[in-house]
Amino acid sequence: MNPVYEAVSRLMKPMDYIATILSPGEDKTSETVEWELSMLLDWVKQTYTLESDELMVNNLLNFSKGFWRGLFTCYDHYYIPRTNNDLEQFFRQTKASHRRITGLRNWNSYIVRNGEMIVLVNDALRQEHVISRLRSVSFSRYKARKAQWDQRLTCVILRKKFNRNTEGYLNDLEHKWNLLNG
């Protein structure tokens, strides 16, 4: 059993190093964590050269390559949950807040209607300098974003009108068509 343990222990070392590098810390930035992880992956390629190591090295490189783009975001933005447990807790709090506001247990239509704004608004209200951050947005950028948001809500509103009163919705469309072409 000792040779098997030693082989597994040897292959686990890079995983332990990766866990240490990716662990949350106050002074970590995406740039430093990305650099440390890329150095570690280079070290793994140079150190684990045995034929039996090939599967682990390839798997590690492919797996990290697939997640590379979004892997370091949480180090630059403190308000993005860093771990899966933090993320689950954040969603649970958001869902509970919706339940208190509406009294509804299911929040699917709420998510469709408001989308990412649920998360952004709830999180922004907890941030310290939200007022100064809002003041830094130009009116033209606000207006463009508001137009996008209104367009998104228009689709949801039309779908609800159609589902609520299909006959009336279709009659209204025909009436508008007749006014345009009449």
Image (tube, helix red, strand yellow):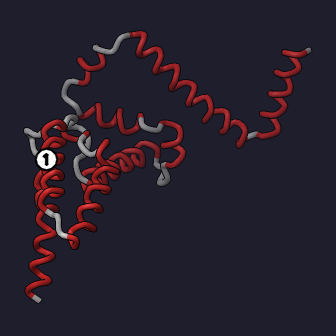
Instruction: Estimate the x, y position of residue 9 in percent, counting from the top left.
Output: 11, 73
For the residue carrying disc 1, how many other residues have a C-alpha within 10 Å: few (<14), some (14-19), or many (20+)? few
Whether residue 133 appears in this view of the structure is yes
At 24% across and 51% down in the image, what residue appears? 86
- Mark 1 residue element: helix
**Count of picture labels:** 1
Frontmost residue, 170 versus 168: 170
Instruction: Estimate the x, y position of residue 100 in percent, counting from the top left.
Output: 39, 46
At 42% across and 37% down in the image, what residue appears? 116
Q: Quadrant of the C terminus?
A: top right
Residue type (three-letter) at the residue carrying disc 1: Met
Whether residue 23 appears in this view of the structure is no
Q: Quadrant of the N terminus?
A: bottom left
Instruction: Estimate the x, y position of residue 97 in percent, counting from the top left.
Output: 36, 45
In the image, residue 73 sits, relative to residue 84, either above or below, namely above
Instruction: Estimate the x, y position of residue 52 in percent, counting from the top left.
Output: 22, 73
Q: Residue at label 1?
A: 39
Q: Quadrant of residue 46?
A: bottom left
At 67% across and 33% down in the image, what residue appears? 158
